[in-house]
Image (spheres, rainbow, N blue to C red):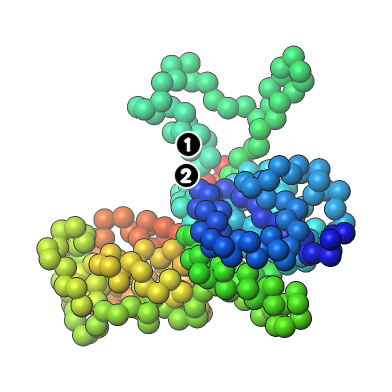
Amino acid sequence: MTTNGKPKFAMYWAASCGGCEIAVLNTHEKILDVDANFDVVFWPVAMDAKYKDVEAMEDGSILLTLFNGGIRNDENEHLAKLLRQKSKIMVAFGSCACEGCIPGLANLSPVGDIVHTAYNTITTDNPNEIYPRTSYDVPEGELHIPTLAKVLRPLEQVVDVDYFMPGCPPESHQIAAVIDLVIKVVKGEAELPPKGAVIGAGDSTVCDECPRARNVKLIKEFTRIQDIAPVDPDLCLLEQGIPCNGPATRSGCMARCPGVGAQCIGCYGPAEGVMDYGARLITAFSSVIDATEPEEIDRILDGIPDPTGQVYRFNLAGSLLKANRDAWKVK
């Protein structure tokens, strides 16, 4: 507690796009409840607070920290460990913190290749091949920039996590519901779920929220949604040959994408009980293939243009695979 009697709240943005921060602001007037019930002590995107301010706090003095983003560099890792030390409740907030999300796809390449691509491509004029350095001497002293890790890791692979809130980003109405729950807990009117629980999402699949009909229809090929005209407005997209990730994806978004004719891309991560999202999804895709010969099955699966992006777009870093061999080997 602070001198004003409010519990402390913190939020941090590691390796992510910033969409989670916007999603919090999109809770509109609910953000006022955060201000009314918490003392916001650290939220770099919204206030001027220094790392030394957090380091000076007593261990466990922050009641709730929402940590969004994966761990891509040594600064991310330092803040993850520091905020874990200072916080009673650490929430992996959003897909990047939970599963690695889009930044985790970089785990397909060694870090040197990533830097080279970023600073030496056809859209980058870098004739002298100048690359960032982790330290540089200037008249005022030595400057430091964070050092990239060889792979991106979800928060759970670095520190102990109390709760997971998936989504890219989490839906604002789900964030508002979690804020309400925490406020009730602070007031003694509710209890937190068991440690390790997924909060702000459903416990089923997107298919269970999807209004489209399933007719156990089998397909002879997968195709891109833009190559089908017109898309049946009522039939399951997967049964139209469109690789929809709904069967393996956690519910909670109210099937927003398939509801308007776009396939689910899996941003809410693995459904309850799914050990590996990619493996479960390939199993679901295979269930609608109308073929028995291995060669024919391979031909149909080859119709998925980007298999890795299809099944691991949001959770490669959190999957059993985690990264490819070349990325792991680089020191």
The numbered mark at residue 113 is 1
Is 71 in front, or is 185? Answer: 185
Image quarter in which the C terminus is found: top right
Query: For the image shown, how many numbered marks are present on the structure?
Result: 2
Is 16 in front, or is 185? Answer: 185
Mark 1 nearby-residue class (10 Å; few <14, some 14–19, many ≥20)? few
- The residue that appears at 30% across and 72% down in the rendered structure is 259
- Give the amino acid type for the residue marked by disc 2 in the picture: Ser
Q: Is residue 110 left or right of residue 284?
A: right
Q: Is residue 74 left or right of residue 307?
A: right
Image quarter in which the N terminus is found: bottom right
Look at the picture and state if 173 lies above or below 83.
Answer: below
Secondary structure type for disc 2: loop
- Report whether residue 65 is seen: no
The numbered mark at residue 109 is 2
- Report whether residue 116 is seen: yes
Q: Is residue 291 left or right of residue 260?
A: left
Secondary structure type for disc 1: helix
Image quadrant assignment for residue 213 = bottom left
Is the C-beta separation of discs 1 and 2 under 8 Å?
yes
Q: Give the farthest residue toward the bottom.
A: 215
Image quadrant assignment for residue 138 = top right
- The residue that appears at 26% across and 60% down in the rendered structure is 304
Is 38 in front, or is 58? Answer: 38
- The residue that appears at 25% across and 73% down in the rendered structure is 238
- The residue that appears at 63% across and 73% down in the rendered structure is 180
- Give the amino acid type for the residue marked by disc 1 in the picture: Asp
Give how far across and how far down residue 22 sits, in percent.
Answer: 52, 53
